[in-house]
Image (cartoon, rainbow, N blue to C red):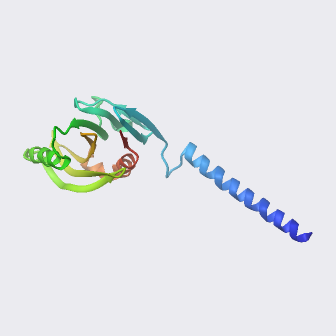
């Protein structure tokens, strides 16, 4: 009889601990904490994008943009984003992704205001092969760093362009990596 009390007691303790762990995880996911950021989702043009809740859906000057998001805390006086992720969609026009990627950066890097950091790193997004270009642009004494990830889907190329001031880029890499690891493309 005593053994059954011990077994029941142990089961009750395990249930209490399990409930506490469950509730603790639930609170950190819903309320957020210093190590976690709440997220929101946007779905546009065949792209589903998760991003920090203090970012906003933004407008882009590019006609090829499917969706753009920006850190709402870093909009300049003319409402341009200093930190953003812009996703563009372009037709491959019968070219391979690698050929289109290389032609684009050969042209882009011929401009003296652009400086290459790295080019052609192969990576993956949701099991799709991607190419990556990291470079700097220097316009109006405002040096920006860009990380462009190119992925192909259904004869289209999607360019995911992460941009931040060069001095702040490393601080935003965790956000860019989160966005890249959670993006879904048709």
Relative to 10, residue 35 above or below? above
Q: Residue furthest right?
A: 1
Quadrant of image for the N terminus: bottom right
* Front position in the image: 167 or 63: 63
Q: Is residue 111 left or right of residue 157?
A: left
Relative to 2, residue 17 above or below? above
* Front position in the image: 112 or 11: 11
- Name which residue lies at 31% across and 40% down: 84
Residue 77: x %, y % from top left? 29, 30
Q: Quadrant of residue 82?
A: top left
Residue 29: x %, y % from top left? 55, 46
- Name which residue lies at 84% across and 68% down: 6
Q: Is residue 9 left or right of residue 105?
A: right
- Name which residue lies at 39% across and 39% down: 49
Quadrant of image for the C terminus: top left
Relative to 69, residue 170 above or below? below
* Front position in the image: 138 or 66: 66
Residue 50: x %, y % from top left? 42, 41
């Amino acid at each position: 009889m005593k053994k059954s009390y011990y077994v029941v007691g142990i089961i009750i303790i395990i249930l209490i601990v399990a409930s506490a762990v469950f509730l603790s995880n639930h609170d950190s996911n819903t309320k957020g904490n210093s190590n976690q950021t709440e997220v929101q989702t946007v779905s546009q043009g065949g792209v589903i994008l998760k991003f920090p809740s203090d970012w906003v859906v933004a407008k882009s000057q590019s006609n090829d943009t499917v969706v753009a998001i920006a850190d709402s805390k870093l909009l300049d006086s003319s409402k341009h984003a200093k930190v953003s992720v812009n996703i563009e969609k372009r037709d491959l026009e019968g070219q391979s992704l690698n050929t289109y990627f290389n032609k684009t950066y050969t042209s882009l890097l011929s401009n003296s205001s652009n400086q290459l950091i790295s080019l052609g790193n192969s990576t993956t997004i949701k099991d799709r092969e991607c190419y990556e270009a990291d470079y700097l642009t220097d316009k109006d004494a405002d040096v920006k760093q860009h990380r462009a990830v190119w992925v192909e889907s259904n004869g289209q190329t999607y360019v995911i362009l992460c941009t931040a001031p060069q001095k702040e880029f490393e601080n935003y890499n965790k956000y860019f990596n989160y966005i890249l690891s959670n993006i879904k493309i048709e």
